[in-house]
């Protein structure tokens, strides 16, 4: 027996026990950092196990190996000698002729102890002919055989298998097999994404992962006859420094994978957020906090995976397997001396030409943009080799800058991005050294999907797409504005540099970036007005999005502040386009229809002020009188007109500025229907932006707003924005912009339930706090997330002349808005405006408040009391 049980403990066979203890010892040494090549040593442990079992086999003598030769062959990762901590062990028991009856007990003798030891073992027992025939019919059988390696048994049978696979399959169907391998790898990329861009990369199957390297190996073995990785260097597919970097990159990724396996206790290739802090610590990364340690770790990982990705693509290009486009190739010619086109790719005529005219280093990318064809592998290597020619004198050259700006402004409507190629070759950083601090710079949160360097290139690409597209999402305003605006080059410079300050400072990066930009453009000898425009856009690139999502857009003062900072219409348009592109390039949490609507609304309001000048008070009065006239003209009788006239005396100026004529009439109708009820409401659909406007007209009472918010939360209604008005007749008008209920089919039923809950809550029949606590118990927060930042409460008494603005930075949970508004109510504060926004991985709830006397709360004691009251109701991080 291979396993027995004594006193509740499992006892392994001697061979399995040796393997088990040997592996445990090896892993312990690995974690201490005292193992030079864990993969190889782990593989040798497995080899020794199989060889010992082969030599001491009880079943083996009964098979009569001379008449029934067999061999044990390692497959897949075990065959490649890449045995990670929890990798599968794949083996083939291969017989020369038909598989004998004794094969089954032989397999049990060798495999069962491994299962007892907790290993994942995949095995097959086949004859030679069955194996070759199966490989010919099924690519999934063939693929692991590409990594076949002799372990023990009759070695000549292993050689026979390799020869037959080559002669009968690989030699005959090479192109079909390679096409299948590449397509399968592409499907992996489609499923797992580009690991060089993702904050939770897949180490194996994502783009830049280990499967890219494996696919290179398989193609090289099938088509080129290469045996192992070193042959890439010997055959000239990798230069010496490329081979060295590739080896180090693979070693780093394997090290991370092994650490991840050990940390999770299983085979795991997805680097989820929940593991990253512990991995960074295990890998000895240091920072001022865990976030910084992880950012450094992920930056290095992305750098290594990016190199693997680029070498994979270069190999495919060099071997002719990289398809840059479909259909018949257009014949193009290059008119720049020193450059030529060869097989649809750009090349340097000779290396000497670069030394004679270093401008060619920039011009080859310009031609790539113009002709819409990529650089050849040799050209990319020459760019890397000669980029040292790019010095301060080169960077300020008029022809160089002119050439770069052509690249910057030309739309990317090819299968590749020229700026990305400039980044990958190192030329872009050589030309703009300040970019070096954001290369593979990670922002460790759930909001920013891409590393900073990739993000800024995506921002540039998004802006350029405005010139090519008819619409962007459901909003065509960016397209219209970009096509008719002046100063496109300056806008694109700002897009490229807008986050350059993040390499120096994560907080206040816009101001730091503006200073870096100013110095950079001065060095390049830009004109002062151009420098001022670009540095302004970099410094203020967050102004519009923060204002739109965190401030009351119906407050004229909000728009005036923006207009005074921006000063002219062209700047506003550029800033708006930069904001849209920046948000789109950040990810779905930064850009949606609601954000687009808010931003467009703010753009039009600021543009109106910049075009017409700041509104004078008489214009405000005129606007109110115009609305009043519209309302009164709707009356059909003198009595109705008198009633309407009387109601105007109850309305505050702020309400009259906010509401349009139709809104006022609808609200008056709602007020009339109130009667003796606690509240009346109206729900209006907004099909274009997929929201609902819920207007609640109620008899004012303390805590009304927090109760409505609590009822909405209880029914899973997400609140986006709130305007709160109190008329002089003690009637409250709370206008909520919300997302519709989750189940649209039963939306009416859900709203009926919301109404019943609100009726019970206002009548004192429903304990909202208790109901929300119950909901919290069934709430399962999202796992696998980053380590959370502390809660923060900011109290702003400067931005508004009439309100204290409270910004609450926290994390979403059921009852959040109710908890905060209830705390504000208990602090004797009246909420006039509430907005829900997002910042990084946090929620930002913004409240415009005054005390019960209608005054701002601006003494230090009041400010501290507000902060304490809110922080006390927020859960511990």
Image (cartoon, helix red, strand yellow):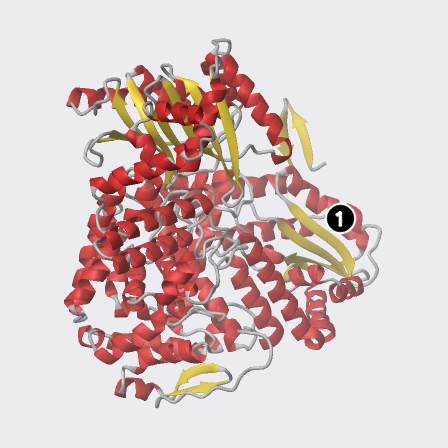
Number of other residues with Cα within 10 Å of mark 1, as a class: few under 14, some 14 to 19, many 20 or more: some
- Please say whether residue 843 is visible from this viewpoint: no
Residue 816 picture quarter? top left
142 sits to left or right of 770? right
251 sits to left or right of 865 = right
Which residue sits at x=37%, y=68%? Answer: 419
Disc 1 is placed on an element classified as helix
Q: Quadrant of the N terminus?
A: top right
Q: Position of residue 413 (x, y in %)?
A: 47, 70
Residue 83 % position (x, y):
55, 52
The one nearer the camera, 284 or 677, is: 677
Between residue 586 and residue 117, name the one nearer to us. Answer: 586
Image mark count: 1
- Work out whether residue 595 can be spotted: yes
- Look at 41% across and 76% down and name the residue there: 369
* Rendered location of residue 368, percent (x, y): 41, 78
Judged left or right of residue 608, residue 245 is: right
Task: Specify the quadrant that holds the C terminus.
Answer: top left
Residue linked to disc 1 = 106
Find residue 861 and report its image quarter. Answer: top left
Q: Residue 793: give x, y in percent of width and height.
A: 28, 29
Q: Is residue 388 above or below residue 822?
A: below
- Furthest residue toward front: 638
Q: Pick whichever, 7 or 800, lies toward us.
A: 800
Is residue 191 placed above or below 842 in the rendered structure?
below
Q: Is residue 757 above or below residue 335?
A: above
């Amino acid at each position: 027996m291979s396993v027995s049980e004594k006193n509740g403990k499992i006892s392994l066979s001697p061979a399995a026990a040796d393997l088990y203890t040997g592996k445990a010892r090896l892993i312990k040494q690995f974690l201490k950092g005292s193992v030079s090549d864990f993969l190889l040593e782990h593989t040798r442990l497995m080899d020794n196990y199989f060889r010992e079992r082969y030599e001491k086999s009880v079943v083996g003598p009964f098979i009569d190996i001379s008449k029934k030769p067999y061999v044990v062959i390692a497959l897949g990762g075990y065959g490649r000698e890449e045995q990670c901590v929890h990798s599968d062990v794949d083996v083939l028991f291969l017989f020369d002729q038909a598989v004998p009856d004794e094969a089954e007990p032989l397999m049990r003798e060798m495999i069962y102890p491994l299962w007892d030891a907790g290993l994942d073992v995949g095995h097959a027992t086949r004859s030679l002919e069955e194996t070759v025939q199966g490989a010919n019919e099924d690519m999934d059988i063939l693929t692991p055989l590409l990594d076949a390696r002799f372990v023990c048994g009759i070695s000549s049978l292993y050689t026979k298998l390799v020869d037959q696979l080559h002669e009968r399959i690989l030699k005959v169907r090479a192109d079909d097999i390679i096409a299948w391998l590449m397509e399968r790898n592409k499907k992996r990329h489609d499923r797992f994404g580009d690991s060089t861009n993702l904050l939770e990369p897949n180490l194996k199957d994502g783009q830049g992962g280990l499967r890219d390297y494996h696919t290179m190996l398989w193609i090289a073995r099938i088509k080129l006859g290469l045996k192992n990785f070193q042959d890439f260097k010997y055959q000239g597919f990798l230069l010496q420094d490329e081979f060295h970097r590739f080896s180090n990159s693979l070693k780093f990724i394997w090290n991370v994978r092994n650490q991840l396996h050990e940390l999770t206790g299983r085979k795991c290739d997805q680097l989820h957020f929940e593991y990253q802090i512990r991995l960074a610590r295990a890998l000895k990364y240091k920072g001022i906090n865990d976030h910084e340690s992880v950012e450094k770790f992920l930056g290095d990982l992305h750098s290594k995976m990016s190199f693997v990705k680029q070498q994979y693509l270069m190999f495919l290009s060099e071997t002719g397997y990289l398809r840059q486009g479909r259909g018949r190739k257009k014949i193009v010619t290059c008119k720049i001396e020193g450059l030529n086109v060869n097989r649809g790719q750009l090349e340097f005529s000779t290396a000497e030409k670069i030394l004679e005219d270093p401008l060619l280093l920039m011009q080859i990318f310009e031609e790539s943009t113009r002709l819409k064809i990529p650089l050849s592998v040799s050209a990319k290597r020459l760019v890397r080799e000669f980029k040292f020619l790019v010095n301060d004198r080169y960077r300020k050259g008029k022809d160089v800058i002119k050439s770069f700006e052509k690249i910057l402004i030309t739309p990317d409507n090819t299968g590749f991005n020229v700026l990305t190629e400039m980044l990958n070759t190192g030329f872009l950083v050589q030309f703009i050294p300040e970019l070096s601090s954001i290369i593979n710079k990670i922002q460790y949160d759930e909001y920013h999907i891409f590393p900073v360097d990739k993000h800024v290139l995506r921002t540039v690409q998004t802006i350029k797409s405005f010139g090519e597209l008819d619409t962007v999402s459901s909003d065509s305003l960016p397209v219209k504005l970009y096509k008719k605006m002046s100063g496109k080059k300056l806008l694109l410079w700002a897009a490229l540099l807008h986050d350059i300050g993040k390499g120096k400072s994560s907080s206040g990066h816009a101001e730091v970036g503006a200073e870096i930009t100013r110095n950079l453009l001065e060095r390049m000898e830009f004109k002062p007005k151009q420098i001022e425009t670009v540095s302004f856009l970099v410094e203020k690139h967050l102004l519009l999005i923060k204002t739109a999502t965190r401030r009351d857009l119906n407050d004229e003062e909000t728009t005036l502040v923006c207009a005074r900072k921006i000063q002219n219409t062209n700047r506003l348009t550029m800033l708006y386009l930069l904001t849209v592109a920046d948000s789109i390039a950040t990810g779905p949490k930064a850009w949606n229809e609601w954000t687009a609507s808010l931003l467009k609304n703010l753009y039009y309001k600021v543009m109106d002020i910049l075009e017409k000048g700041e509104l004078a008070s008489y214009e405000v009065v005129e606007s109110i009188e115009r609305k009043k006239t519209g309302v009164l003209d709707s009356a059909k009788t003198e009595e109705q007109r008198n009633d309407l006239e009387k109601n105007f005396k109850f309305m505050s100026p702020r309400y009259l500025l906010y509401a349009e004529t139709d809104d006022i009439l609808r609200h008056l109708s709602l007020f009339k229907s109130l009667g003796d009820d606690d509240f009346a409401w109206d729900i209006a659909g907004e099909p274009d932006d997929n929201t609902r406007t819920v207007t609640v007209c109620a008899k004012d009472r303390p805590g009304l707003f927090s109760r409505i918010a609590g009822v909405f939360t209880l029914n899973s209604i997400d609140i986006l924005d709130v305007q709160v008005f109190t008329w002089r007749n003690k009637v409250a008008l709370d206008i909520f912009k919300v997302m519709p209920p989750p189940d649209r089919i039963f939306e009416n039923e859900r709203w009926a339930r919301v109404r019943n809950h609100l009726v019970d809550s206002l009548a004192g029949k429903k304990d909202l706090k208790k109901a929300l606590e119950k909901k919290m118990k069934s709430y399962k927060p999202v796992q696998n997330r980053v380590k959370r930042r502390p809660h923060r409460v900011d109290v702003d008494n400067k931005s508004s002349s009439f309100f204290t603005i409270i910004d609450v930075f926290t994390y979403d949970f059921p009852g959040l808005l109710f908890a905060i508004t209830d705390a504000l109510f208990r602090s004797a504060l009246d909420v006039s405006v509430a907005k829900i926004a997002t910042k990084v991985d946090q929620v930002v709830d913004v409240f415009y408040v005054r005390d019960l006397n209608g005054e701002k709360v601006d003494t230090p004691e009041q400010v501290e009391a507000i902060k304490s009251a809110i922080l006390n109701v927020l859960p511990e991080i």
